[in-house]
Image (cartoon, rainbow, N blue to C red):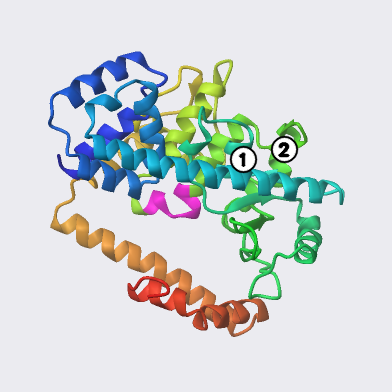
Amino acid sequence: MNYKETLLFIARCLTITHERIHQELIEETIKSGLINWDAVVKVSTGQYVFPALYCNLKRADLLHYLPVDLVEYMKHITDLNRERNQQIIKEAKEINELLLSNNITPVFLKGTGNLLEDLYEDIAERMVGDIDFLVDKKHVKTTFGILKKNGYTNKVSELFEDHRHIPRITHPNKIAALEIHKEMLRKEKATFFNYETVENSLLTTNNITVLSYENQIKLTVFSKLINDNAYFLKNINLRGAYDVFLLGYKLKVKTEVFDNNLSKELNAGLDLYCNLLSKPQNLEYTSDKKSQQYVVDCFQNLTPNRYNKTEKRVLKFYVKSITRLQILFKSLFNKSYFLFVISKITDINWIKTKLGFKPNS
């Protein structure tokens, strides 16, 4: 199995809980004995869907076809992720109660929001990094101050005025870092999808507030295609595709997900994700020539030739270089960015990571 075949096999596996026909196809594929399980582990881990893969195979009663040692390893990793997510849910609820008591309503985003709203049949399915939440701009500094008083801190004493979230903050006794968002998208796109545009459609259950399902789908697409430059780089993200797939099944009626200002990225992302996994029956969107070409380009990148590999390396280098040069330039005039750069320079683990060494090695 090459990389493309492996990724598409994993993608199809992520649908088998909801789609019986895919379950039958996957069962036949596994029984054929042609699956390179080492490649499956590597790709699914790199795509952050390894626990989700295990959970879907388990629910479909297909684990008995897999090597015993692989099943044991998958279960171990999934159990560890479940324990981590239980702690993240606990910490997020504590933050929610703390901020609500100060008349600030946090809107939990992305992975943490998905966990809090019970998007997954098993919370172990989603691999989560930070706890991301959105607050009204006027509450950002107050929110930061409240959390600082409760033990959260960072190495940058001031806030970034022109970034969508303040530098991540941590607590010595908490498992997850926090990202306080005043915007959800990069600066040049933020006016089209922000707190003001989603405020009237927020969902609140048991005092926990998240975006509407439609806006969760949008943010899942925008987080990768806009914020992480996936539209430019033609990158594929199975974790995002899986989230859109599950969110689509939450829609109770036919719902067209559209955005007049960001249609290019939204249509491309939805077209890609629905081609990778499957299109939930109530999810409607516009598939046009541009979005279809984007899907073709992304799939071609899965089996790159020498030219495509070189082009992708150049594009990645360009994006990283531009971002870092912008930060360095801003650090000459902005104290917050200066402190941020200094914090990175003095962070030996960060330096080792950038040089290719393991932290604390």
Q: Is residue 230 magenta?
A: yes
Indicate which disc, 1 or 2, sits on the residue closer to the N terminus: 1
Determine if residue 227 is in view.
yes
The reply to whether callout 1 and callout 2 are in contact (CB within 8 Å) is no
SS under mark 2: strand
- Residue that carries the numbered disc 1 in the rendered image: 113
Q: CA distance from mark 1 to mark 2?
A: 8 Å
- Locate residue 187: give its quadrant: bottom right
Residue 164 vertical position relative to residue 253 in the rendered view, above or below: below
Q: Is residue 270 magenta?
A: no
Give the percent coordinates (x, y) of residue 341. Answer: 55, 79
Q: Residues within 10 Å of mark 2 (few under 14, many from 20)?
A: many
Residue found 21% across the figure and 44% down from its top: 39
Report the disc number at residue 209.
Answer: 2
Give, as a three-letter code, the residue at label 1. Gly
Range covered by the magenta-colored residues: 224-232
Residue found 55% across the figure and 32% down from its top: 258
104 with respect to 46 (left or right):
right
| On-image quarter of the N terminus | top left
- In depth, the one of 291 and 201 nearer the eye is 201
SS under mark 1: helix
Give, as a three-letter code, the residue at label 2. Thr
Give the percent coordinates (x, y) of residue 225. Answer: 45, 48
Give the percent coordinates (x, y) of residue 345. Answer: 50, 82
- In depth, the one of 113 and 160 nearer the eye is 113
